[in-house]
Structure formats: C-alpha cells, structure tokens
Amino acid sequence: MNSAVYENIKLYAKILKMPTFTQYQDVIRQLKPNIGLDEMLLELMKKECYSRQDNQLKRRIHTARFPVTKTLEELDMSCFENIKPTFIQQLASCDFIKKRRNIIMIGPPGTGKTHLAIALGMKACASGYRVMFRTAATISTELCEAKDIYKLSKLESTIEKADLLILDELSYLNFNRHQSDLLFKVVSERSERASIIVTTNLEFSRWTEMFESETMVAALVDRLTFKS
C-alpha cells in the first residue's frame, strides 16, 4: 500500500466526514473475488451509513441520560396483570410519539414501571426520536437552579426539543409552589405538542399530597391525561 495515498485517503475522509472509508481494505477483504468497482463503492457507502446510524443512536441514548440500560426483552411481563404483551409491543412501535400522546404508569413499587419507561425510551431513540429521561425530583431541581442563574429559558428550550420526556418517580417528593409552577409549565407547554411518559406510585386522587394547590393538580392531571 502506498503510504502517501493512504494518508491522502485519511485526509479526504476526514474532510468529507466519512471515517469508515479509511477502512476500505477491510471491506475489500470481505468481498467476493473479482467484484466490480461499483459494488465495492456500494459496500463502502453501506458501511459508512450503518456507522453513522450507530453513532447517532449512541448519541441519542447518551443525551437522554437513562440511569441504566433496559430492554423490553428483559422485562418481566408477569408484573403486569392486566396488560397484554401485544399492547406493550404496540407502545414499542413509538406510534404514540408520532401522535403526540402520553403514557401514564400508575402502580406500587417493583412493578416494572421504570424498566418499561426506559425500554420504551430506548425504542424511541432507535426510531430516531430525541428523548429526555429525568426523575421528577431531578427535573424540579434543574428547573429551579436554572431559574436562579437566569438560564431557565435555555433549559425549557432543551426540554421542548425532546420528542419524548420521561418523568420517573413522580411520587417521592413534595413540591413547593415554586417547584410546582415550573413543573406544571413544562407539562402544559408539551400538551398536544410532544409526548410524556410519567411513572408514579400514587393514583391521581393522592397527587394533592405532592402539590400544594388542588386547582393546579386538577389542571396538571388534565394536561397529562388528555390523549393519553
């Protein structure tokens, strides 16, 4: 191999942002003997395409900030007494994101809510959607801190860009009026615009234990359950 030629290939591959083209020798070795130039080029382009798709998926998963990696294949379906596997597969198609619908998961601890939420989030990433995963406590803290340092608009814009927002563990924190208002604004602005998944241990009638205003609770539940 001519080293000067190879260095130029590396240079142009970098300029064109096509790094897999530097691996052309590996691709050629895997091809059938006497293959045509056009077919070799096609295989190189396929490899570049698959590499980009894989890197994009990794970036979407990293940006989502899932606490752990969970898949539907690992999900214990026995936890869901009244939910059929076909319904889970329907959710996994991510059609609910396309239709801008929400999913509300209510049940006691240990019933697989967070696992299912993460698994659906992973499916959404694989389908090309932008996902943001936060516990209710974490997003509440982030919103308050952003407001204190005058960066609330920037954070709200980031949240708004997510095709799917997952709010996990909306159960364990009592929100003051300030936190409630910020959280309500996030949910309200996504209504009919983008999807939310919420996991909670508390039925709606007990949400007044988390929020000070019963009026706000009613409005929050209304926003979340509309087209859910």
Image (tube, helix red, strand yellow):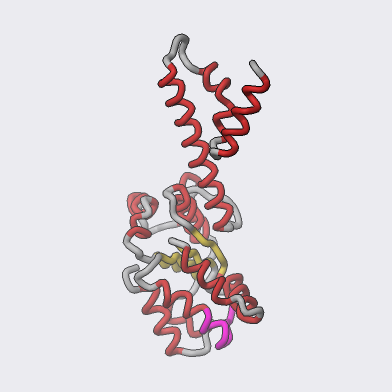
How many numbered marks appear?
A: 0
Magenta-highlighted stretch: main secondary structure? Answer: helix
Measuring 54% from the left and 38% from the top, which residue is drawn there? 16
Which part of the image, by quadrant, shows the N terminus?
top right
User: From the viewer's perspective, is residue 225 above or below residue 81?
Assistant: below
Question: Any magenta on residue 141?
Answer: no
Q: Quadrant of residue 94?
A: bottom left
Q: Quadrant of residue 144?
A: bottom right
User: From the viewer's perspective, is residue 21 above or below residue 109?
Assistant: above
Q: Where is residue 65 shown, x and y percent of the image?
A: 58, 58
Inspect this view and state whether residue 107 appears. no
In the image, taking residue 218 as reference, residue 12 lies left or right, namely right
Measuring 43% from the left and 61% from the top, which residue is drawn there? 163
Q: Where is residue 91 shown, x and y percent of the image?
A: 37, 55
Measuring 37% from the left and 69% from the top, which residue is drawn there? 193
Q: Where is residue 121 shown, x and y percent of the image?
A: 48, 55
96 or 103: nearer the viewer: 96
In the image, taking residue 59 as reference, residue 82 lies left or right, namely left
Residues in magenta, as a range:
173-182
